[in-house]
Amino acid sequence: MGRQTAAIKCADPAGVRTSPLTGLLFTRIRESGPVDIGTFMSLALGHPVHGYYMTRDPFGAKGDFTTAPEISQMFGETLGAWAADVWVKLGAPSRFSLVECGPGRGTLMADALRATRRVPGFHASLAVHLVETSPVLRAYQERALKGFAVTWHDTLETLPANGPLVLLANEFLDALPVRQIVKTASGWAERALILDAQGSLAFGISPAPDSLPPLVRFSAREGDIAEIAPERTAFVRSLAVRLRRQKGAALFVDYGYERPASGETLQAVKNHAFAPVLEEIGRADLTAHVDFSAIAEAARVEAVSVYGPVAQGSFLERLGLMARADIVLKAASPVQAKDIREAAARLLDPAQMGGLFKVLALYEGLETPPEGFS
Ligand code: SAH
C-alpha cells in the first residue's frame, strides 16, 4: 500500500508532552521497552480516559472526518433495505437481533430503521443491539434512536445467544488495531515505538513475536512492512461462530485492499487532513486499511459463506441508491437537489468513496445469498 509514514519524532526535553497519552507512552517505554503498533493504536483510540473515541464526537464539518451515513441519509436507508431483505431470506424470523458495531452518532441505524418502517413484521421482530465502547458516542446514539429499545455492548460476547443476527458495520474494522511486521536482513521483526538516542518518541524495531509465519501471506523483500490485525481476525471468527450457530448475516463497509499486500497504511486524521501519527496522540483519529482477504479467510475458517468484497459504489447501485435519490429529488428544492446529487456522487463515484470503500458480507442460513454482490 502507498503511504509511508516517516519516523516522526516528538521531543520530550523537559517532560513537555503534547498529550497525556504521549506521557504515558514515554513512561511505559522507559519502564518496559518498545510498545508495538497494535498496543499504541488501542491506547490512542480506546484508553478509558484519554482515548480518541472516549472523549469526543469526531464526525462532521466541525470534527475530524465525515463518514458515509453522515454524508447522506440514503446510505443508512439503503443498508436498512439490505438488512430487511436478509431478514426475509432468513424466513422472516419472529425474533432477531439487528446489530451495529461502532455506530458513531447512531445515524446509520436511525436511517435504516426509518426506511424499513413499512416492511411488514420487520420492526415487530427486531431488537436493536449496539456494540460501542465510547460513552460519549453512546449518548449520541441514545438520542438518535429515541423511541427504540436499544441494548449496548462493549463486545460481541454479550449479544443474545439465541436467534439470528443481522449485523452492520461501517468504518468499524479500520478502528481495530493493526500490528506492523518488517522484513529485515535477519528475518521478520516488529515495528514498535521506542525512545531514540535523543529521548524522542520514534518508530523503531523490536524482535518479532513468535507466531508470525501464517500471518504474513506474501513473499516479502527486505524493508517490506506487513500489517496484521489479530484483533480483527478474532472479532470476525467469533462473529462467524455465532452466525453458524444462530444464522444471519453481517455487512462490513470499509476502506481497504482485496489481496494480501505489503505496505503500511496506519494514518492519523485531524480536522479533515492527514496528521503526523506520533503527534497529538489521542487527539487525532488513527486508522489502518482493512485487509479484506484476511477477514474473508477468518470467516471461511469457521465455515461461513463470504460474499465480496465489491466496490461500495456497485453495491449501493445494485441496492437501488439512485432510485432512492430520484424519489427524494422529486420533493427537493433546487438547493436540496444539488446537495442530494453531490452526496450520491460522493458515495457512488469509483474515484471517490464508491471505489475507495469496499463491502463484504458473511452469511449463514439464508434461502438465497444477500443482495448487492452480483
Ligand atoms: N459507523 C460510524 C462510526 C465510525 S467511527 C459511521 O460510519 O459514522 C468508529 C466507531 O467505532 C465509533 O463509534 C467508535 O467509538 C467505535 N469503536 C472503535 N473501537 C471500538 C471497539 N473496539 N469496540 C466497539 N466500538 C468501537
Image: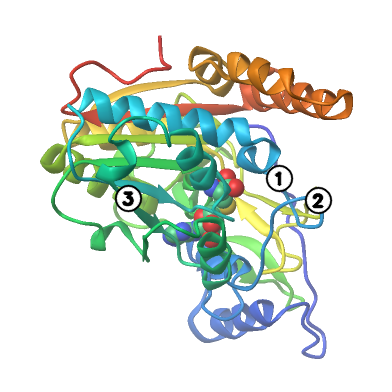
Q: On screen, 170 above or below 259?
A: below
Compared across the picture, whether 61 is left or right of 27 comes to right
Judge whether residue 232 can be spotted in this image. Answer: yes
Disc sitting over residue 66 in the figure:
1
Q: Position of residue 134 (x, y in %)?
A: 52, 68
Q: Position of residue 10 (x, y in %)?
A: 78, 71
Would you name the residue on which mark 2 appears?
61
Looking at the rendered image, the quarter that the C terminus falls into is top left
- C-alpha distance separating marks 2 and 1: 7 Å
For marks 3 and 2, give the one nearer the viewer. 2
Ligand 1 contact, mark 2 (Cβ < 8 Å): no
**Mark 2 secondary-structure assignment:** loop
Q: What residue is rendered at 52% in x and 72% in y? A: 135
**Mark 1 secondary-structure assignment:** loop
**Mark 3 secondary-structure assignment:** helix
Q: What residue is rendered at 20% in x and 56% in y? A: 160
Give the colour scheme of this rendering: rainbow
Ligand 1 contact, mark 1 (Cβ < 8 Å): no
Would you name the residue on which mark 3 appears?
235
**Do tag 2 and tag 1 residues touch (Cβ < 8 Å)?**
yes
Q: Position of residue 187 (x, y in %)?
A: 43, 45
Compared across the picture, whether 188 is left or right of 71 comes to left
Which of the 4 image quadrants contains residue 29? Answer: bottom right
Name the amino acid type tagged 3. Phe
Q: Dot 3: few (<14), some (14–19), or many (≥20) neighbours within 10 Å?
A: some
Name the amino acid type tagged 2. Ala
- C-alpha distance separating marks 3 and 2: 31 Å
